[in-house]
Amino acid sequence: MLVFDVELLHGTYRADPDGSASTGRQANGEWPPAPSRLLAALIAADGTGGQSSRTTGAELEQLAAADPPVIYADPDPHHQSLEERYVAGQYRARSQQQEYVARKGVLVRPGVRIAPRYPRVRFVYDFEIGDDDLAALGYRAARVGYLGCADSPVNITVTRLADQSVEGSEDMLWAPDPDGQEIVNVHADGDVARWAAAFGAWSKHGATRSRTRRYQPRALYRHPLDPPADTQLGRVPVWLRFQRPVPGRRAAVVAHGLKKATLKRYQQDHGDPPSWLHGHVNDGEFDYQLARFLALPNVGHPHSDGKIHGAAVWVPRGVDEIDVRNLANTLSSIQSLSFADGSRVTVDRSRRSWTTDPRRWQGPARRWVTVLPAVSDRHQRIDSTAVIRWCEQAGLPEPVQFRISRKPFLPGGVDLHPIETRRPGHTQSRPYAHVGLIFEVPVTGLVVIGSARSYGLGLCAPCDPREDQA
């Protein structure tokens, strides 16, 4: 086990994960610090060709070829967008900069500064390294002045552990996981030679787009606060945020528009959509588990208004990984949604909100309540038998307690008219109600119940965990 301990000397960190800082539209900075950035800093500390007697470059090749590390870092740091400003440029110009004669003012967009609660980061690699190479890495680490931007000074130490006993809190563990939803830039075998060649081309020809091409391998990590994939009923590959909110009473219309856009784009990019996505399946083929197109309302806060701030597509567990990646690519390419009444909403990828945060809807929790009413699968009065049947159909355990109401339980919960529970083009209405559920053990979401769950009706949110103390 090879362990790099990084101390953020200013208690903050600033880096650009994808080149979007210069556009002024970057909502979040790079967090956790990328393993590729650690390797780049070690290369910069002493080069790649053994310029000094203490390093040969072989230690860098071993590190670059290693699997992505486990990272211990703050799970939810504060992201502060910095104000753009003008500074004096290096080229001569007339009447451009008042403070500096014959200089031009250049717009600088510094991006996002991150302030973690715990200003330390730990990278843990699982591979063996010799004493000489370990000493060379230690020499390089001691010469690293900063990670990311120059206003992020760090102190780095490297140690080797003989066993798996690595100190670190589980609620700070970022682990490589193909089912994870956090994209982290990592290094790969051959990166040292590749970056050395790029540096040589830059030294000879300068920075030109024709000679410098962006290359950055990426890996999926599981967020420390996200439950493991094997405990989830399904997953959401991409969360969409709208540029402007949509009234909550249009939840079914939004879900229908999302499904229509998804199937159309999937057909264009990847061919015929799978049956679990379009929903036309044989009886029992997927045991009631199909894709769910969800409208996400703003609920739970005393000032919540129930307006829809985003959308998502839930994928049932057991779906082929290639299909999930295809769906993720499809959703990432959707720029806007068109609805049945001719209106349109634009997808905004420059910001995030609590309404479109996975942790808002996933739990785990024992107590769940509907934020959109659940629609019955039969033309009968909704009773205990119906609620238990809905939970079974949704793949949930049987609740130990529940309550039924025509009014929402949470602030901002949406109270629909019967006609608003129908999908566009359908004329038949069924009984519906808001439901509160209590399970014997914590359940990991997303939790959606009722016959219209494929269109997001019956979407539940976890209650305040403090209520579980009762």
Image (spheres, grey):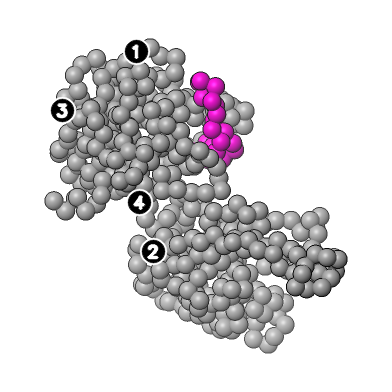
Please tell me which residue is depicted at 80% across the width and 64% down the height of the picture: 96
The answer to whether the residues at label 4 and label 1 have Cβ atoms under 8 Å apart is: no
Tag 2 or tag 4, which sits nearer the N-term? 2
Q: Nearer the viewer, mark 1 or mark 3?
A: 1
Q: Which residues are magenta?
A: 324-347
Residue bearing the label numbered 2: 172
Label 1, label 3: how far apart the Cα atoms are: 23 Å
Residue 388 position in % (x across, y down): 20, 30
Q: Which label sits on residue 227?
A: 4
The residue under label 2 is which amino acid type? Met
Magenta-colored stretch includes residue 332: yes
Pointer 4: residues within 10 angstroms few (<14), some, or many (20+)? some
Residue 223: quarter of image: bottom left
The residue under label 3 is which amino acid type? Ser
Residue 127 position in % (x across, y down): 50, 69
Q: Is residue 317 visible?
A: no
Tag 3 or tag 1, which sits nearer the N-term? 3
Q: Nearer the viewer, mark 4 or mark 1?
A: 1
Label 4, label 3: how far apart the Cα atoms are: 29 Å
Tag 1 or tag 4, which sits nearer the N-term? 4
Q: Which label sits on residue 384?
A: 3
Residue bearing the label numbered 1: 428
The residue under label 1 is which amino acid type? Gln
Tag 3 or tag 4, which sits nearer the N-term? 4
